[in-house]
Amino acid sequence: MAVHVGLHDDNFYTRRCVELARMAIGCTSPNPMVGYVIVKDGKIVGEGFNPKAGQPHAEVFALRDARDLAENATAYVSLERKGVVGIIDPNPIVASKGVDRLRAAGIVVTAGVEEALCKKLNEAYTHQMLTGKTLLALRYSISLNGQVSDHLGEGAIDSGGYYSKLPQEYDAVILSSTYLHDKPSLPTSQEPSAKQPLRIAIARSSNATLEVPGLTTGSEVESKASLVGVETVISDQITVNAILDYCTRPGLCSVLLDYTGNTDDLEELVKESFEQNMLQKIAVEILPLWCGRDDRNARFPLNTEEVSKMKSLQPKIYNQSTILEGHL
C-alpha cells in the first residue's frame, strides 16, 4: 500500500470512516462499530462498515467495493485493522497486533488519527474492554427553573428526535416499574431499522404491579412474565452493581438509566451510581418550560457535594430544547 497524497488529509478520510461506522449504531454490540475507506490517487474507491454482529468485517465490504482498484491504495479504518488507523483496539487479545504485523511486513501504518472522535464512536466497547464493566449513563429532563421534569421536548420521540435516537445507542434501558402505568408505551427508537434496547424494569416490592402491553402481573410475576418472554430476576437487593453484573453476562456494553416516570424505584440507583463512581455519562434535556413546585419529581436525589465536574460537555439543540451530554 502506498502513502496517501491527495486533495484531503488523513483526518478527512478517518472522519468518513466514523460516518460509515455510525450507520450501524445499535446493531454491532458487543462488537465495535467500524468504518473502512480505500483511497487511490486522491479518490475514494471503496467503502464499507460492519453492519451487525456476526457479519463480515468492514474491510471485506470495502475491498468488494473497490475491487481491482484496491491494489497500491491507502486504507483508512476507524479501529485498528490496517493502513491509517483511528485508534488501537482496546481489546487486550488483539491490541496493536494488527498494526505490528503490517509494520513488520514493511507496510506504512499511521495510528492515532482523529483519535478522540474514534474513541467516542465506541466508548461503551472501550469501557468494557478496559474495565470489564458495562458503561452506565443517566438521562433526565429539567425545566428552566431547575425542576426535574417528566416531560420531553417537542418532537423528541419522533424519528430524528433526540429521544428517538437515544435508545438506539444503548443495549439496555433501566426504567421504573411504574413507567408503563404512567406512559402508553416503552421508550422506542423510531429510527429506520433501529435495534431496540433491552428494557429493565425495577420493582423494589414483591407486591409491585408490572404492566407491559399484553401483560399485567402482580403476585404471579414470574409465571405470567415467562409466557411472553419477560425474564424475572429476583434479588435480595437491587443495586447498580447487581444490575451491571447481570448486563455483563449477555454481553451488554451500555445501559441507560432513564430517570422518568415515578422515580421512587430509581432514586437509590442514582445515588449509588454517583457515590461509588459507577456513572460514566450524563444526558440532560433542558426544556423550555417552567414547572411548578408540586411536580412529583421536582427534587433530584443528590447533594451538590456528590457531583463531580463534567468533562467533554457537548450542547445540542433539538427544536426548543437544549441537550447537554458529558462524562464524569
Image: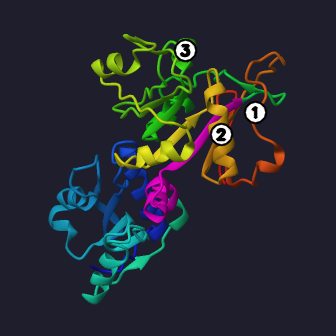
Residue under the image location 72 percent in, 27 percent down:
287
| Closer to the eye: label 2 or 3 | 2
Q: Quadrant of the C terminus?
A: bottom right
Question: Residue 45, how many percent across, how many down?
Answer: 27, 61
- Give the residues in magenta: 118-141
Identify whether 75 is placed above or below 172: below
Q: Which mark is residue 183?
A: 3
**From where the camera sits, is residue 197 visible?**
yes
Mark 2 packing: few (<14 Cα in 10 Å), some, or many (20+)? many
- Residue 41 inside the magenta-drawn segment: no
- Number of numbered discs: 3
Callout 1: SS: loop
Q: Amino acid at mark 2?
A: Val
Left or right: 307 as drawn, with respect to 109: right
Where does the N terminus fall, quadrant-wise? bottom left
Q: Amino acid at mark 1?
A: Phe
Residue underneath mark 2: 270
- Upstream in the sequence, badge 2 or badge 3? 3
Residue 106 against residue 228 in the figure, above or below: below
Label 1 sits on residue: 300
